[in-house]
Image: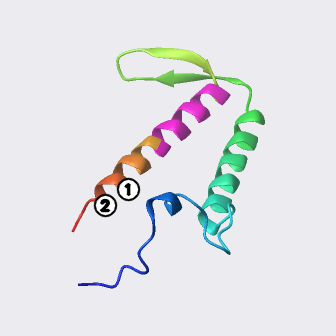
Amino acid sequence: MADEGPIRKADDIGRKEPGDTFWNARRIAGAVVIGVLVLFAVLNLQKVNVDFGVTSVNLSLIFVIVVCGAVGFGAGYLVRGRRDNRD
């Protein structure tokens, strides 16, 4: 059986350990990616024609960028969830 560290009391669950910080490398990278996405979206305000195969619509490019970012985030979240559940 693997060593899981010291036994913690129920009152200690969720409390930060000494040395824990909110801004770890993963959160910093996420903030940078979101910042770049927002900057890119704000700088591209023109209208574009989006073709869906069956129909096409004229949308603001900022809307297209934000929707694509949200879809990519959702797909990454789902893939990560499946990978975490693998044995």
**Residue occupying image coordinates x 46% and y 37%:** 71
Q: How many marks?
A: 2
Quarter of the picture containing the N terminus is bottom left
Describe residue 80's horizontal placement relative to residue 63 as left or right. left
Amino acid at pointer 1: Arg
Label at residue 45: none
Start and end of the magenta stretch?
62-73
Circle 1 residues within 10 Å: few <14, some 14–19, many ≥20: few
Give the camera-side residue of 56 and 19: 19
**Residue occupying image coordinates x 65% and y 66%:** 24
Q: Main secondary structure of the magenta part?
A: helix
Label at residue 80: 1
Q: Secondary structure at mark 1?
A: helix
Residue 80 found in image quarter: bottom left
Residue 64 found in image quarter: top right
Q: Are marks 1 and 2 in contact (CB under 8 Å)?
A: yes
Queried whether the magenta region covers residue 65, the answer comes back as yes
Q: Identify whether 65 is placed above or below 76.
A: above
Q: Secondary structure at mark 2?
A: helix
Amino acid at pointer 2: Arg
Give the camera-side residue of 44 and 83: 83
Queried whether the magenta region covers residue 64, the answer comes back as yes
Describe residue 84's horizontal placement relative to residue 63 as left or right. left
Quarter of the picture containing the C terminus is bottom left
Q: Which residue is mark 2?
A: 83
Describe residue 29's horizontal placement relative to residue 13 as left or right. right
Q: Identify whether 20 is placed above or below 69.
A: below
Circle 2 residues within 10 Å: few <14, some 14–19, many ≥20: few
